[in-house]
Image (tube, grey):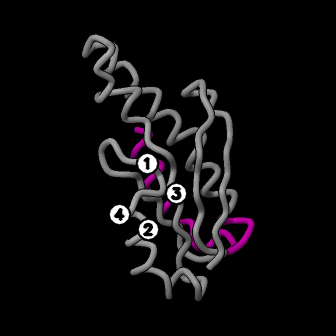
């Protein structure tokens, strides 16, 4: 199974962000880690195993970004208002950096026709 590791600096979060991509083509699926977990947790590994045939056949691409929990609601070192202030930066990261990367990679490998749902979701989130 194709697996790619990407590390890019996030202007929105002011730090490097890791993203694992499983698959070479197909409908994009973005999977976020559960609370206080990492982008390659056992839960995600198990899910990739279940989806393995679809991923290997090029029907599905799975994008797993790293978590930012410790910088927002689970950051016990800051006042709750400070932790809440991180949420808009995370939202901007998703809209301005992660989803454009997913669109670019999917468009590059599968063509624009597989992106209609992702485009609709992006538009609805950004409102």
Q: Is residue 119 above or below residue 81?
A: below
Tell me if label 4 and label 2 are in contact, CB under 8 Å: yes
Who's the residue at 41% across and 57% down the image?
A: 41
Badge 2 element: helix
Which residue appears farthest toward the front when viewing the image? 42
Q: Is residue 123 left or right of residue 79?
A: right
Magenta residue check for 21: no
Expressed as whole percent of the image width and height from the top left, the position of residue 87 reads 37, 28
Tell me if label 3 and label 4 are in contact, CB under 8 Å: no
Distance from disc 1 to disc 2, alpha carbons, whole Å, reads 11 Å
Residue 43: image tag = 4
Query: Magenta stretch?
Result: 106-127
Above or below, 65 against 77 in this view is: below
Q: Mark 2 — residue? A: 45
Q: Which-is-in-front pick, marks 3 and 2?
A: 2
Residue for badge 1: 38
Q: CA distance from mark 3 to mark 2?
A: 27 Å
SS at circle 1? loop
**Disc 3 secondary structure class:** helix
Kindly identify which residue carries mark 3. 119
- The Cα atoms of the two marked residues, 4 and 2, are separated by 5 Å
Is residue 109 inside the magenta stretch? yes
Q: Is residue 123 above or below residue 44?
A: above
What is the quadrant of the N terminus in the image? bottom right
> Which element is circle 4 on?
helix
Q: Nearer the viewer, mark 3 or mark 4?
A: 4
């Amino acid at each position: 199974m194709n697996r790619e590791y990407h590390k890019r600096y996030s202007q929105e979060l002011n730090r490097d962000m890791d993203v694992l991509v499983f698959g070479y083509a197909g409908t994009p699926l973005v999977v976020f880690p559960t609370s206080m977990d990492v982008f390659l947790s056992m839960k995600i590994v198990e899910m990739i195993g279940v989806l393995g045939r679809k991923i290997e056949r090029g029907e599905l691409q799975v994008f797993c970004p790293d978590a930012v929990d410790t910088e927002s609601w689970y950051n016990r070192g800051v006042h709750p208002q400070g932790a809440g202030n991180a949420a808009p930066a995370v939202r901007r990261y998703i809209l301005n950096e992660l989803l454009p990367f997913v669109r670019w990679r999917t468009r590059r490998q599968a063509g624009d026709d597989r992106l209609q749902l992702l485009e609709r979701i992006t538009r609805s989130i950004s409102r």
